[in-house]
Amino acid sequence: MAGKYRRIIEWVFKQRVAALDDEIEGSALDEDIPFHRDDLEAAMDELDISVGNVPDIPYAYRSRRPLPETVSQHGYSAVIIDDTREGEDPTYLFTKRNQLIAVPEVVDETHQTSLSALPEAVRPYIADDEQGVLTQTRYAGLLDDFTGLECYHLTSHLRFRVRGREAELDDLSVGVDDAGDHYALAVEAKGEGETLNRNQLIRNTRGIENKERYPDAVRTLAVKLHEGDIYLFEFDVFESDGDDRVETERVWKYE
C-alpha cells in the first residue's frame, strides 16, 4: 500500500505544481500547494491504481509517514487540511509549515507504570496502534494522573464537522476537578511509527469547542506510544495574527 500511496501523491504534486505555474506569477513551489479528492482519483485513473479508502492517502502523509523525497526536496513537510477554504470537499495542502510534533528527548516528568494494571485477559492482545495505547492509558489511569482530574471516558472515534468539513477525534473524556467543574478532554492517540500533527490537534480542539453538548472548557491532549513507553502531551491551541497555532505545554513519560 505504501508504494501505491507514494506514486499517487507524487503524481498529484507534479500535476498541481504544473497547473499552478500556469496560473500564478512566480513559482508555485514558493507556496502551499492545494489539491482535492478529485486530484487523487485522477491520479488513480492515470496510474491504474485502486485504493478503497481514498481519504487515507492524505491522512497517511499527515500522520503516518513522511512525504516522498521527490516532494520533500522542495521544502514540503506534510499534508494538512485547510479549513479556511469554502466548500464541503476538503482542500488538502502540501505545506512547508512545520506540522509534525516529535517525541522530545527530555520530558517534564517521568513516571512508572506497569502492565499489571491491565486485565490479564487483554494483555496478550493489545496492539501497538492508537487503540492499543488508549486501552493501556485507560486501564492504568494515566489520564487522571496526568491531568489531576477525575476522568470519565465518554466516546471513541467521535465524528464532527469543522467549518463544514468532517473530522474525527480518537477519544473524548470528561474531567472533573475538585470544585466540580467539567472539562472536555480531546485526546489524539498515536501508535508506534505515527506522528502528531499540529493541524489535526487544531481541528480536534475547534471541533469540540463548537459542540454545545460538551463542556465549554477544552483541554487538548495526546497519547503516544514510542519505543514501548507511553508519552502524554498537553497542548495550548490559540489564535495569533488570525491563524490557529499549537504549542506544547508539557510532556510526561510513563515507562
Image: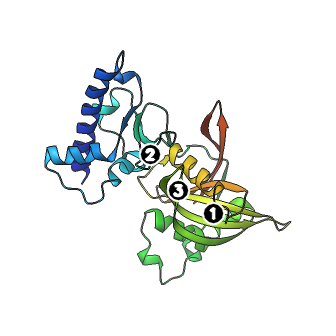
Q: Tell me the SS state at disc 1.
A: loop
Q: Residue at coordinates 23% horizontally, 38% vertically from top-left?
A: 11
Amino acid tagged 2: Gly
SS at badge 2: loop
Q: Nearer the viewer, residue 59 or 64?
A: 59
Cα–Cα gap, marks 3 and 2: 13 Å
Q: Which residue is mark 3?
A: 161
Of all residues shown, which one is farthest toward the top? 26
Picture coordinates of residue 217, whole percent (x, y): 73, 56
Looking at the image, is mark 1 or mark 2 earlier in the sequence? 2
The location of residue 119, given as percent across then percent down, is 54, 81
Question: x, y (%) of residue 44?
Answer: 20, 48
Quarter holding residue 53: bottom left
Q: Is residue 134 shown above or below 161? A: below
Q: Which residue is mark 1?
A: 112
Residue 64 against residue 183 in the figure, above or below:
above
Could you tell me residue 49's position as x and y percent? 17, 51
Give the residue at mark 2: 87
Q: What's the CA distance linking mark 1 and mark 2?
A: 47 Å
Q: How is the image coloured?
A: rainbow
Q: CA distance from mark 3 to mark 1?
A: 38 Å
Number of residues whose C-alpha sits closer than 10 Å to that of mark 2, classed few (under 14), some (14–19) or many (20 or more): few
What is the quadrant of residue 126 in the picture?
A: bottom left
